[in-house]
Image (cartoon, grey):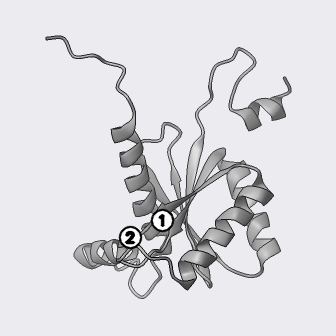
Amino acid sequence: MTQRAEERDGFTAEGESTPRRILAIDYGRKRIGLALSDELGLTAQPLGMLVRTNRRNDLRRLREICRKHGVSRIIVGHPLHMTGAAGEMADEAARFSDRLAKELRMKVELVDERLTTWEAERMAAETQSKRRKGRALDDVAAAILLRDYLERRRAAAPTSITEKE
């Protein structure tokens, strides 16, 4: 197996799994907020924001970010209404998610993002972040989306340690 194939498949020549990261995307028409997990999938950190230019350039930049950070999976925020109904932006995010999966050839998952922006704004207000004052919080919303996703995955995963009675 070539080194490139090993990187793509997430395995070394010895068959050991290499840790891979998850990229979270808070999709917007003007900006794309980004957050990245650590290699073990335990933490989520804001990565920054991409200012949208055009579809081809946006996909090129996302591909570069995925390569640079060893991303094996992407989650895209699905902005459903509080009722759970999909509106115009939810449909647009779903189309973007499908395009990412096709163009980047990796697993892309839509994840309910209700209240992530609200939580990001609340956190910024509570910490009275001067650094963030007047700036968009799309990357923080993406980090909250990713944090919640990682927590749900951990809660759903079977534990390898059995309790002795």
Q: How crowded is mark 1: few (under 14 residues within 10 Å), some or many (20 or more)?
A: many
Q: Is residue 89 left or right of residue 119?
A: right
Q: To which quarter of the image does residue 159 belong?
A: top left
What label sits on residue 116 in the rendered view? 2
Quick check: marks 1 and 2 in contact, CB under 8 Å?
yes
Q: In this view, does 133 lie above or below 162?
A: below
Q: Quadrant location of the N terminus? A: top right
Q: Nearer the viewer, residue 5 or 112?
A: 112
Q: What residue type is labelled 1?
A: Ala
Spatial CA span between label 1 and label 2: 8 Å
Residue 135 image point, x, y percent: 46, 84
Q: Is residue 2 left or right of residue 28?
A: right
Q: Quadrant location of the C terminus? A: top left
Number of numbered markers: 2
Residue 78 image point, x, y percent: 51, 69
Q: Which of 133 and 58 is in front in this view?
A: 58
Q: What residue type is labelled 2?
A: Thr
Residue 67 image point, x, y percent: 73, 49
**For mark 1, what is the residue?**
142
Q: Which of 29 and 162 is in front in this view?
A: 162
Q: In this view, does 21 lie above or below 61?
A: above
Q: To which quarter of the image does residue 10 belong?
A: top right
Question: What residue lies at 62% left-to-right and 29% top-to-bottom?
Answer: 18
